[in-house]
Image: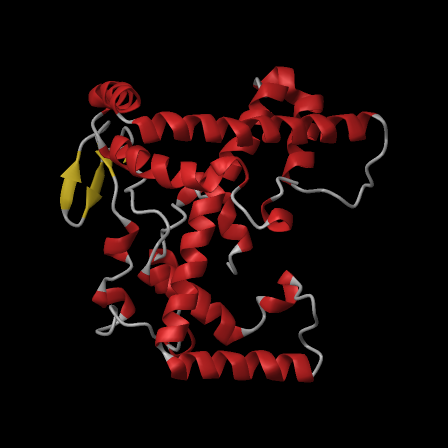
Amino acid sequence: MFGFMSERTDIGNYMKAIDSLLPAFTIGGTLPSYLTKLYFISTMIFSPSVRGALGAVGHVENASRAAVKKRKHDLVDNQETDEKHDMLRKMLDVSDERGKDINFSYEHIVVESHSSLFAGADTTSIAMNSILYHLIANPASYEKLTTEIDAAVANGTLSLPVAYAKAIKLPYLKACINEGMRLHPSVGLTMPRLVPVSGATISGVYIPQGYRVGVSPAVVQYDQKIFGPDASCFNPDRWIERDATSMDRAMIQFGAGPRTCIGKNVCGE
């Protein structure tokens, strides 16, 4: 829809904009709340690249609005089949049926759509780069994965184009995906949570109500107590040879709990 694939270029300098904005957003996201606004205002004033990037992001925001508008019209005009039940369709349905009751309007859908594009593009790229890099850097793992894929194609388990439902049934492929995202999580922020009224005891330390706590995925996902003494190495076999339950619980690059990133559902999880 946006033309990146068909034109093979950075339409509207959007990718360049993401590269310019993310460092600023990352720093802003780690600052105390009373400094965040001051930081962003000063960044926009003194950084020409950030000002230009905001204009490029506006291009994708407009495209997001146009996509939601077209989808809405297709539903009204009965031009859409019932088979297309993706996230956008579900949000439109919720807004139509219960929007007033839960304060979920058309504008909220536009914001959600734009947020998905902004947050999902760079994180997906990081994950894919990490997986491919480590496979290329580890020829034995690369050969083992290609052997599994070739065998699946030969026996009809895997067809082209590859269907998601079939791909996630390949154990070594899933192990490689997990291991790549473990070693280089797409998000390095702590994704903090507020301590509840009852307080919380974390690693033997009691923390009172209202405090903000969090941990970086890059710290947890290198923990040798969870992932073994070779936690700093790319070893997809750990996901097959060991009980993966404790390791799965420690994979927090998508966050955890009810606020888990919805992208987790399309990454082999």
Q: Is residue 105 visible?
A: no
Q: Residue at x 58, y 78 (%)?
A: 149
Which residue in the rendered view is the most extreme toward the right?
78
Q: Position of residue 74 (x, y in %)?
A: 79, 30
Determine which quarter of the picture holds residue 63. top right
Q: Residue at x 25, y 41 (%)?
A: 214
Determine which quarter of the picture holds residue 89. top right
Of 76 and 269, nearer the camera is 76
Q: Position of residue 237 (x, y in %)?
A: 39, 78
Which residue in the rendered view is the most extreme toward the top?
100
Image quadrant containing the N terminus: top right
Q: Position of residue 84 (x, y in %)?
A: 75, 43
Of 107 and 22, nearer the camera is 22
Q: Tell me: 132 left or right of 87.
A: left
Q: Tell me: 223 left or right of 93.
A: left
Q: Is residue 161 above or below residue 198?
A: below
Report the label total.
Answer: 0
Of 202 and 32, nearer the camera is 32
Q: Is residue 24 visible?
A: yes
Q: Position of residue 255 (x, y in %)?
A: 38, 45
Q: Is residue 169 above or below residue 85?
A: below
Of 127 and 102, nearer the camera is 127
Q: Tell me: 187 left or right of 263.
A: left
Q: How is the image coloured?
A: secondary structure
Q: Is residue 87 above or below residue 69?
A: below
Q: Residue at x 49, y 51 (%)?
A: 264
Which residue in the rendered view is the most extreme toward the left?
205
